[in-house]
Image: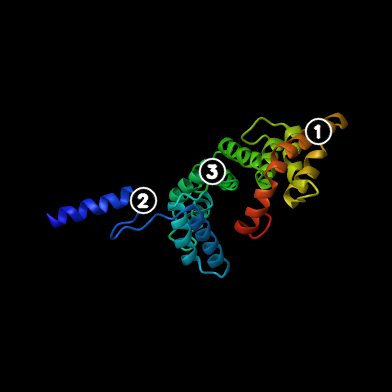
């Protein structure tokens, strides 16, 4: 009888939002963000295992950046046994929740055939997703694919336009600048004008609306430009 009453009381506490004996409240959004920050701090001091535990908890709490960072650790075997299947699953999870950098990582997996069969068309799709979220690295890779006709129909105008988003003076991404130099040589003056106009449109639609988030996140999740 007493056992039954205790069980009922514990259930009522849970239903009312209070942790009963032996129950732990799941991490809240602010807690998840702190876990991500703790993980990044651990990673910066070379403590990959502590970083892994923090990112794992953040992922379980539903934080997309936690999922992204945990996915990268599984992909590289940093602080945990390498498991590309799990890493890709976490990156897809992060991308589905809107993380701006996960698509770039997924595009790279398909571009290089890391943990999956090499598929340039799939790589292009992921790179475009990332580019539209403001990741200029993804725009650079997508521009390369268009300029060379890899995984997509060759379109040097579109290739120039996507590369130009990262070559903008506010970013000056080295890879994007190199891409522009390579592509521009094959364009006529009319094509160049069209490509520049399209690039300006891409920049205004995909970089400008996301630049705040991209700058903040890139400073925390990436040590530098690639």
Q: Which residue is mark 1?
A: 197
Q: Position of residue 130 (x, y in %)?
A: 62, 42
Counting other residues with Cα less than 10 Å from the Cα at mark 2, is it few (<14), some (14-19), or many (20 or more)?
A: few
How far apart marks 2 and 3 lie (CA) works out to 30 Å
| Residue at figure coordinates x 53%, y 67% from the top left | 42
Disc number placed over residue 120 in the picture, else none: none
Q: Position of residue 92 (x, y in %)?
A: 50, 43
Q: Which residue is mark 2?
A: 17
Q: Of helix, strand and loop, which one carries label 2?
A: loop
| Residue at figure coordinates x 18%, y 53% from the top left | 5
Q: Quadrant of the C terminus?
A: bottom right
Q: Which residue is mark 3?
A: 95
Depth order, front residue of 193/145: 193
Give left or right: position of 180 versus 88.
right
Q: Earlier in the sequence, mark 1 or mark 2?
A: 2
Q: Position of residue 73 (x, y in %)?
A: 50, 57
Q: Is residue 73 visible?
A: no
Give left or right: position of 62 versus 184.
left
Q: Earlier in the sequence, mark 2 or mark 3?
A: 2
């Amino acid at each position: 009888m007493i056992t039954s009453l205790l069980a009922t009381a514990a259930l009522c506490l849970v239903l009312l939002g209070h942790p009963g004996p032996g129950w732990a409240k799941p991490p809240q959004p602010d807690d998840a963000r702190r876990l991500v920050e703790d993980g990044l701090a651990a990673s910066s001091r070379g403590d990959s295992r502590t970083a892994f535990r923090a990112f794992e908890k953040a992922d379980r709490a539903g934080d997309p950046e936690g999922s992204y960072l945990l996915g990268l650790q599984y992909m590289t075997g940093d602080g945990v046994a390498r498991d590309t299947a799990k890493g890709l699953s976490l990156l897809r999870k992060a991308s589905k929740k809107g993380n701006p950098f996960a698509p770039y990582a997924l595009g790279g997996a398909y571009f290089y055939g890391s943990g999956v069969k090499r598929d340039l068309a799939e790589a292009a799709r992921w790179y475009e997703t990332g580019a539209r979220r403001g990741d200029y690295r993804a725009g650079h890779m997508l521009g390369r694919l268009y300029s060379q006709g890899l995984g997509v129909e060759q379109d040097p105008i579109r290739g120039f336009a996507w590369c130009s988003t990262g070559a903008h003076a506010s970013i000056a991404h080295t890879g994007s600048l190199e891409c522009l130099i390579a592509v521009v040589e094959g364009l006529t003056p009319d094509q160049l004008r069209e490509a520049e106009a399209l690039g300006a449109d891409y920049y205004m639609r995909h970089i400008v609306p996301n630049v705040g988030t991209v700058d903040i996140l890139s400073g925390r999740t990436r040590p530098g430009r690639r």
